[in-house]
Amino acid sequence: MELRPFSGTYLTDPAAIWRDLLDGPERVHYAEDLGLWLITKHADVRNALGDSEAFSNALTLMPIYDMCPEALSIVMEIDAPPTTAAADAPTHTRTRRALRATFPNTAARVNEQYGAIVRRRVDELVSRLVARRGTVVDLVPEFAAELPLLVIVDLLGVPPEDVPAIKSWSDGQIALVWGQPEPAEQVRLAQGLLDFWRYCQKLVTLRVQGGFEDDDCHDFVSRALRYRGGDDEVLTENEVASFAFNLLVAGHETTSGLIAHSLDNALSVPTRWERLVENPAGVQAFVEETLRFGPAIDGWLRVTTRDVTIGESTIPAGSRCLLLLGAANRDSATFAHPDAFDPHRADVRDHLSFGYGPHFCIGAALARLEAQVALTQLTAAMPGLRLASEHLSSFKPNVGFRAHNALPVLVDTFAQLDGTAPQRAA
C-alpha cells in the first residue's frame, strides 16, 4: 500500500486514512512509497514506544528519503551527539537524568518556574491581537507559532534578535527530516541545519565564557552547565549544546501545533468556543482532548534492531517504522467513539501524543500550560473571535508533524448572541 502523506486526503483529513488502516485486517502495513512499516494500533504503538531495545531511536531524526550527495555531505558535518529523541540507553539514561534535574517536567514545577513567563508572553500577544479588532488575522504566524517560540527562547536565554533565524532553522529541520524537499532545497535546508548547530555550540561557549555559576542565571543552558560541573562523564559541553539544539525545535514546533489544533477545534464549531467563553474551567479538558483527537506530531520514527512480529507480519531487523500516534489515538479498542471530539471523555489520558516510556516528552507539562493559558486568555479577551468564512483547514506536507497552513480569524472582542449583532461580553 501507499500512505501518500504529501498529497491528497492526508493534507486535509489524515484521520480518514487512519480509519482505513485501523479498520483493515492487518495490524501493520508496509508503505511502499515511503519504505516504512506503519504501526497503527494503540497497543502496538505503545509497545513500540516503550521498547527501545527492539525499536531503536538511532535513526529517528534522519530524513525518510535518500538525500542528495551534496546535502548529505553538509549534514555529516553536524557533530551533535544524540541526547534526547535520537539517543538510546545507556546514553539516554544519563542525559534524561540531566534533563529531569534541569528542566521542570511536572505541572507544579512548570507553573512555579515558568508560569509567569508564559502568562506574560500570552498577554503580550493577546493584547496585540485585540488592537487589531475588526480585521482578519492568521493565528498561525501571529499567535500559535510565535508564542511557544518566544517562551522557549526565554527559557534558554536566547537573544531576542536571534528569534527569526531560529524560527527559520527550526522550520527547515522539520521540512528536511519529515518532508520531501527537492535536491536544491535539501542543500539549502542542510546548510541551515549546520548553521543552527554551530549557533547552539556558540550559545554554550558564550555562556561558559560569560559565567554561568551564579544561581541567579536561571536560563536552561546555565542550569545544564552547573549540573555538568565541569565533568564530561556527567555531560559534555557538546551535549549541552545538543540539548539546546533539540529543545529549540521540540520546545516550540509541537506546542505551536497543539495551540493551532486547539483553536481550530474550538472555532470550527462555534458552540465549542461559546462554551469555553462561558466556562473557562473547561479549557484543560478541551486541550487534552485536542491532544488525543489530532496530535501535533501524529507519526514518529523508530528502527528495528531485530526481527519483530506483530500479528501475522514480521518486520525485518533494520527496518524503519512509522508509529502513527494519530491513528493509535483513534483506536476503538482503547477509546469509546474515537472519531468524536468529546472533552468530557473518561479515557482521554490514554492518548499517546506525548509518547510513552523512557522517551515520554520532557516538555509535556510546559506544552499543556502554554495551550491552556493561551485558550483561557483568548476566550476572555475575544469572546466573539471566529474563523474567517473562507477558511478550509489544510496541513503542510509532512509525514509526522501536522502543522496548519493557516488559521485566518476575524478578531472580534464582542460576543455573538443567537446570530444577532455583536454584543459586548459581560
Image (cartoon, rainbow, N blue to C red):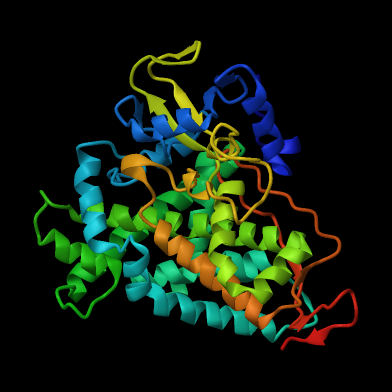
Left or right of 321: which side holds 113? left
Q: Nearer the viewer, residue 170 or 15?
A: 15
Decide if residue 86 is in sight here: no
Quadrant location of the N terminus in the rendered image: top right
Q: Position of residue 298 (x, y in %)?
A: 55, 42
Q: Position of residue 282 (x, y in %)?
A: 59, 67
- Residue occupying the point 13% across, 52% down: 234
278 above or below 193?
Answer: below
- Residue occupying the point 57% across, 64% down: 145
Left or right of 345: which side holds 8? right
- Residue occupying the point 49% across, 56% down: 169
- Residue occupying the point 47% across, 82% down: 120
Quadrant location of the C terminus in the rendered image: bottom right
Q: Nearer the viewer, residue 151 or 263?
A: 263
Q: Position of residue 334 (x, y in %)?
A: 54, 36
Q: Nearer the viewer, residue 1 or 35?
A: 1
